[in-house]
Amino acid sequence: MKFKLVLAFSFWMLMMAVSCNKDDISFDAPSRELSFSRDTVFCDTVYHQVRSETYAVKVYNNEDKDILIPRIHLEKGSYSLYKINVDGKPGFDFKDVPLRKKDSLYIFVEIAPEATGPEAIAEDKILFQSPAGQQNVVLFSVVQDAEFFIKTPTNPNIIASGTTWTNTKAKIIYGDLTVDQNVNLNIQPGTKVYFHKNSGMKVLAGAALNINGTVADNVVLRGDRNDPAYDTIPKNWNSIRMEAGSTLNMNYARLFGGTRGLELKQANATISNSFIHTFQEYGMYAVASTVNARNLVMNNCGESAIGIFKGGNHTYVHSTLVNYSDVLHSANRNVIFASNEWKNASGQAEQGALIFNVRNSILYSDRDNAVNFEQTPGQQFNFTFQNCLLKYSGTSEAGFPFDNNVNVIQSVRNQDPLFVNYFVAKMNLRMKQNSPAIGKGNVSVAATVPVDIANVSRTSNPTLGAYQYF
């Protein structure tokens, strides 16, 4: 019992001593400059009156003494578009901020601005003033004016008449946006369409989605998290669903970062000069659909870049269809999966005939095999690979023989295309100068697509894929 009393008394004496020492801490003025975890905070693109995510800056005291930073404040003060929080306290101007020796503190930054036009720049600085001199951290963000499409219990979020979207405002979609039957939605060059988490677009029977970008002004369709870190992360939104009898015309578009890119069910799609990449499941999921694509680039999809079910009619010319991924390395990651069969929502198998043609294209992967055909006996399954470069590991894996196959014409297998860089978000899938794809295209086929995705002529010595080497 006496031992316990002595132990308790000693504990309380120790606590009092610590408290007293804490109270006796003295803070001096800084004699050296502070250091920071970053000298510039690039906030992701933000939209009119929508708060950004929060960014952190660490401030380090490199001295062997405790200091008081005389003043930390936003250069534009209360008029700033930015908000900061210094060591847990919100505001725009802070005096005598303590910082222990060899320690650090956090400053959190966010922005929720008013837009002043289609696109503007928001800048400010966090200023640090002390006897050691003035220092700063720059704050920078692109601000876009935006139009919102929000599905609620009282708003079904339907485009019920012909509509044209221009690039004067970004389009932000919350929940599903539906293009009604027999209605056209036209999207003009440079328009940015952002989907919130678990959001997507649905195009009903008889309706048309016309995406009309240009080589200089692509139409961008992606998740609404604009930080560059999200450029290579899938599953930020759902998909664009083209229902039976609908039509997609897509030119110079960049579609990325969702669960599935295009979901086509008995739909018709014409796709030109476009990028589809970074989807959790499929870049394109097509059921009994017709697809005509040229100068199409695809990469970084979990199940398959293109999944073809219940047959259909597919043609791909001068396309770069690949599947490399750091994020989705454990998934199947086919380039092409094609089957006569599809299981409907009730789990019943439905079948259809397939016509599948690929010409002057590259189908490659960091896996052993890029193509997986599952043919149903008795069903039509016609395919052609003409002047293509394929990653191919054998009949059992690919579902077809390569050698001595009349459907495989002047094509080569397992020769590294030698892309400049296939892991970068904007994917430089151009060829290095010693690529085996250079000059291997069929001239007659190239004449049907006389310029590449960057508007470079390919009428002579055509390179396989979407990019002409020059």
Image (cartoon, rainbow, N blue to C red):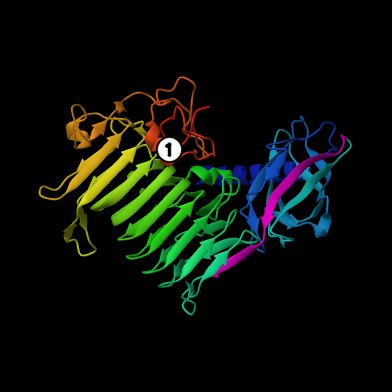
Q: Position of residue 293 (x, y in %)?
A: 39, 47
In the rendered image, which quarter is residue 262 located in? bottom left
Foreground of the two, 433 or 88: 433
Foreground of the two, 93 or 156: 156
In the rendered image, which quarter is residue 267 located in? bottom left
Main secondary structure of the magenta stretch: strand
Residue 200, compared with residue 153, is above or below; it is above
How many numbered badges does the structure rendering display?
Answer: 1
* Relative to 155, 102 lies left or right: right
Secondary structure under badge 1? helix
Foreground of the two, 88 or 157: 157
Foreground of the two, 470 or 238: 470
Q: Position of residue 305 (x, y in %)?
A: 36, 44
* The furthest residue to the right: 131
Q: Which residues are magenta?
A: 132-149
At 38% across and 69% down in the image, what residue appears? 206
* The furthest residue to the bottom: 154
* Relative to 389, 468 lies left or right: right
Residue 179 visible in the shown view: yes
Specify whether residue 385 is painted magenta: no
Specify whether residue 138 is painted magenta: yes
Inspect the image, locate mark 1, and give the three-letter code of the amino acid beneath it: Ala
Give the residue number, with chain letter if any, for mark 1.
Answer: 447
At 41% across and 72% down in the image, what residue appears? 182
Residue 408, compared with residue 229, is above or below; it is above
